Amino acid sequence: MKQYDVAIIGGGISGTALLYELARRGDVQKVVLLEKYGSLAAVNSHGRNNSQTLHCGDIETNYTLEKALQVQKTAQMVVDYAESLPPFERERLIFKYPKMVLAVGEQECDKLTTRYESFHPHFPEMELLDAQGIATIEPMVVEGREQRINAIAVRDQYSAVDFNLLAHSFVEQALRLQPGFEVQLGTRVGTITQQAGGFVIESSAGRLAAKSVVVSTGGHSLLFAQQMGYGQEYACLPVAGSFYFTPQLLNGKVYTVQNDKLPFAAVHGDPDLLVPGKTRFGPTALVLPLLERYHWETLPQFLRVTKPQLAVLRVMGNLLSEAEVRHYMLRNILYEVPGLGRRLFLKEAQKIIPTLQLEQLEFAKGFGGIRPVMIDKAQQKLHLGEAQIDPGTGILFNMTPSPGATSCLGNAQRDADRIVNFL
Ligand SMILES: Cc1cc2nc3c(=O)[nH]c(=O)nc-3n(C[C@H](O)[C@H](O)[C@H](O)COP(=O)(O)OP(=O)(O)OC[C@H]3O[C@@H](n4cnc5c(N)ncnc54)[C@H](O)[C@@H]3O)c2cc1C
């Protein structure tokens, strides 16, 4: 049986960033990355399935200042990585677009002004714009608008990333630095067992042993943890996000102000990196019993991590007891209904572009991923953001909803520290 120092399971942005980080440090020699599909970053890290945003904390009104500063730091790591590449490579994977968060109506405008005052000292490139200022960047946001608007905007920073190409770039760089590292595509891991001195991994390509293992397989990570007796306090609430296309109407990213009562991020619109000439609106937030979008074979795996236990039902009951959350979740189901969904979503998108017409809007078929949101059964609440299970035995399990792609290098640094200390 082949022996490794470290096995990384999952070839999305998290797994590939860790491969790169280990190669860059050079403290471990025998590292393997195992990915079940024939290509890297084919699930949530593919640009088709996420919003392609480098979250810097400045326009995300669902973040506290503390979270914003933490995200800003990890986003900068991605920028620094990209800037270390030759221009022709960098230009394929990271993009500068103007970005803003738009407030509509007196209440939101006041809230955004207060936010600007406390955030601006930490984000000096932020501008607070009125309608006239907004029109200099995004004329369509102002056209036909009756209500008062303002926005926090940043004009000239990296704001969009093709995370799929970034994952490929991490692997190329890792193999350049450490030609002995291995990447096995088309290798599905079945079970991980702890044994004296490490772990044995059974995969579709056979058995291997590793002293340390990092599992970065999205919602599947919780399943692996639970199979080994860890993470029993969690269940998974998979929240799918779909998108809608329009012709190109926006020059950059336009986010909207977060409704504090809703646990899922507000809708935004931006140019699509993968479909030139289209503006993409979304994501919606649809609870689905799947660990991977459009992959119904992951239904049994979802049922294994989220059993209909009392604690799970209580969390769902608490969520649904708020009328606003109930209506929001219902609306998000209806957005998927052919014909009706488009009409309903139009209202949401008109918050960004008031003159948007129904015939300009089309459902982005085949686009959209799943955010594996953790349910904390012990505390009976949703654990928003990323989660990690670290039993202290040399294995780590990562569950990474948004902004997990932005924080890939920050998470990789944290995991590499733990592994190297452990080894
Ligand atoms: C709608 C939506 C919008 C988002 N927008 C943003 C955004 O704008 N910015 C941002 O920073 N983040 C965003 N995110 C979050 C971001 O996409 C994720 O945090 C990130 O892609 C997670 O990467 P990952 O590598 O952990 O997981 P994944 O990309 O899901 O990769 C997991 C990998 O594990 C593999 N795998 C699974 N099971 C096995 C097995 N048994 N054996 C071997 N391999 C296995 C899978 O095939 C996959 O390649 C968004 C997410 C969604 C759903």
Image: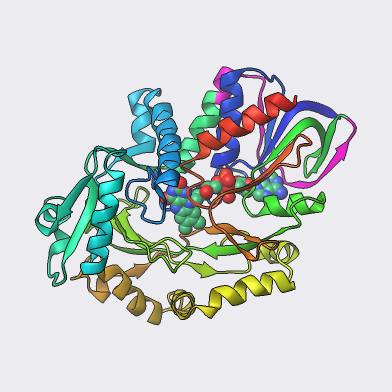
Extreme residue in the right direction? 196
Q: Measured from the top left, where is residue 257 in percent x and y?
A: 32, 61
Image quarter where the N terminus lies is: top right
**What residue is rendered at 69% in x and 19% in y?**
29
Q: Quadrant of residue 346?
A: bottom left
Any part of residue 48 in sight: no
Residue 44 drawn above or below residue 149: above
In terms of image quadrants, where is residue 212?
A: top right
Residue 340 appears at what percent x and percent y? 39, 82
| Residue 155 appears anywhere in the view | yes
328 inside magenta stretch = no
Q: Is residue 194 above or below residue 100?
A: above
In the image, is 54 to the left or to the right of 300? Answer: left
- Say how the picture is coloured: rainbow
- Total numbered badges shown on the rendered structure: 0
Q: Position of residue 8 (x, y in %)?
A: 68, 36
Q: In the displayed orientation, state which residue is furthest to the left.
A: 132
Magenta stretch: give its range: 174-196
Considering depth in this image, is 381 or 2 the residue closer to the camera?
381
Q: Residue at x 52, y 24 (%)?
A: 173
Q: Is residue 188 magenta?
A: yes
Question: In the displayed structure, would residue 335 be above or below residue 140?
Answer: below
Residue 295: percent from left, percent from top: 61, 62
Q: Residue at x 75, y 24 (%)?
A: 423
Tell me if 298 is positioned left or right of 139 in this view. right
Q: Quadrant of residue 305?
A: bottom right
79 with respect to 318 (left or right): left
Q: Residue at x 22, y 66 (%)?
A: 353
